């Protein structure tokens, strides 16, 4: 048999093809392989929360802590399908996917026996051995009113401003970091009404799941709270994966440590200065003030709003009124008397407000499979 001659041209073509394929493979692996997280002083973003939401989605249900009959679960799931579909008339560009959340009573407990920031002030003025002897008469008077509110469950007229003023004066002179550390130390204290839970763990797990779900669908989430801005940041830090710039609350003055009585327009921050609390209460972030602060600090009309009280009504109406996008407002009803310190009268009043304003009511009793987790029980 005659031996077949080898074709050197074909031989090199084969080798070249193999090398080219290998080069493409290595290039893809390099550019598309997962990267380790960048270390350093970076702000948390939606990426971190998306990881949590992705785990739920893989389990088959991103809102697994909600009952199948929960109106929010049905509506939000359908909403997300349409607003993320570029071929849909209801598509919302990522830059316009804005959601706003109240904090107390919407994301965390406000009935143990009252708001976290009110408990914090009471502790500062009445219980803190390093401050209680220095407390002013006005601060003590406010603390006494807060105690009555805790005992009766009825919020007195005018306490909003009294409380805000007392917070500003009772923490005057602290650096921002010192104030943050004080808030975090208090959030680690155990809850009065529950076993196996601290103040900082008293967040509603189904609502945290909603935040994860929104962030997984490229929403920018803001907290718009009536609680002091610095207290809001301290309480939520490490629990809700959004940067401090997206945590908005009531405000007190901030000044330079060497500024004294000099007006801010005439004082220049120096290399020896630190930012400290100035002792002046500026604004309580409730009702129309929430709408104003959204316009000032966010600059966009939200498409989703989550709240729980009349203080959130203006924000809810602002979200769904004359919105160019499909929008919705969801208000929590505190109707669970077994797993939470609920109040049927308040819950019924909120349901009525939902019917009158076009908001969707959320039942803590009927819509959630858990509130704080199975290891937490109400005393």
Image (cartoon, grey):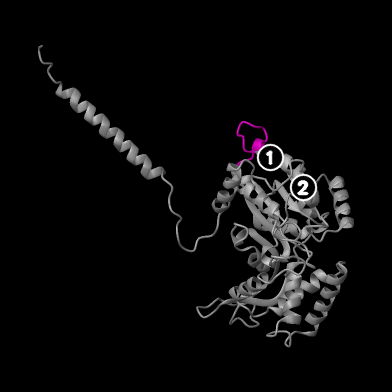
Q: CA distance from mark 1 to mark 2?
A: 15 Å
User: Which residue is under mark 2?
Assistant: 367
Mark 1 is surrounded, within 10 Å at the Cα level, by few (under 14), some (14 to 19) or many (20 or more) other residues, namely some
Closest to the observer, 28 or 65: 65
Q: Is residue 195 left or right of residue 155?
A: left
Where residue 234 appears, as percent x and y from the top left, is 64, 67
Label 1 residue SS: helix
Seen in the picture, residue 311 relative to 251 is either above or below; the reply is: above
Among the 4 quarters of the image, the one containing residue 63: top right
| Label 1 vs 2, first from the N-terminus | 1
User: Which residue is under mark 1?
Assistant: 77
Q: What residue is shown at x 61% (from left), y 46% (from top)?
A: 56
Q: What residue is shown at x 79% (from left), y 64% (from top)?
A: 111
Magenta segment includes 120? no
Where residue 329 appears, as percent x and y from the top left, is 76, 47
Which residues are the magenta region?
81-93
Main secondary-structure element of the magenta-colored stretch: loop
Seen in the picture, residue 49 relative to 112 is either above or below; the reply is: above
């Amino acid at each position: 048999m005659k031996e077949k001659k080898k074709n050197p041209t074909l031989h090199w073509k084969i080798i070249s093809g193999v090398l080219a394929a290998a080069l493409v493979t290595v290039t893809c692996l390099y550019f598309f392989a997962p990267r380790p997280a960048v270390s350093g002083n970076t702000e948390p973003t939606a990426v971190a929360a998306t990881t949590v939401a992705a785990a739920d989605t893989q389990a088959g249900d991103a809102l697994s802590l909600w009952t199948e009959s929960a109106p929010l679960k049905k509506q939000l799931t359908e909403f997300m399908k349409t607003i993320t579909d570029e071929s849909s008339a209801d598509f919302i560009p990522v830059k316009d996917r804005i959601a706003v959340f109240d904090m107390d009573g919407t994301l965390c407990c406000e009935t143990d026996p009252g708001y976290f920031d009110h408990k914090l002030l009471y502790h500062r003025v009445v219980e803190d051995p390093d401050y209680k002897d220095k407390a002013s008469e006005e601060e003590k008077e406010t603390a006494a009113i807060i105690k009555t509110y805790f005992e009766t469950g009825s919020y007195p007229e005018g306490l909003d401003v009294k409380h805000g003023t007392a917070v500003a004066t009772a923490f005057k002179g602290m650096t921002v970091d010192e104030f943050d550390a004080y808030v975090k130390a208090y959030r680690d204290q155990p809850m009065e009404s529950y076993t196996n839970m601290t103040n900082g763990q008293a967040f509603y797990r189904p609502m945290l799941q909603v935040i994860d779900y929104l962030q997984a669908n490229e929403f920018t989430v803001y907290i718009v709270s009536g609680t002091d801005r610095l207290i809001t940041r301290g309480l939520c830090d490490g629990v809700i994966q959004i940067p401090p710039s997206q945590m908005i609350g009531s405000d007190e003055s901030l000044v330079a440590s060497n500024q004294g009585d000099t007006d801010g327009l005439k004082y220049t921050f120096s290399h020896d200065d630190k930012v400290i609390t100035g002792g002046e209460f500026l604004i309580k972030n409730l009702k129309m003030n929430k709408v104003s602060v959204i316009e000032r600090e966010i600059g966009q009309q939200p498409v989703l709003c989550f709240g729980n009280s009349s203080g959130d009504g203006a924000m809810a109406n602002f979200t769904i009124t004359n919105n160019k996008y499909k929008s919705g407002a969801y208000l929590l009803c505190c109707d669970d008397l077994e797993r939470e310190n609920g109040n049927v009268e308040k819950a019924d009043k909120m349901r009525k407000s939902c019917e009158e304003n076009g908001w969707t009511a959320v039942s803590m009793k009927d819509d959630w499979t858990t509130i704080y987790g199975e290891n937490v029980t109400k005393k």
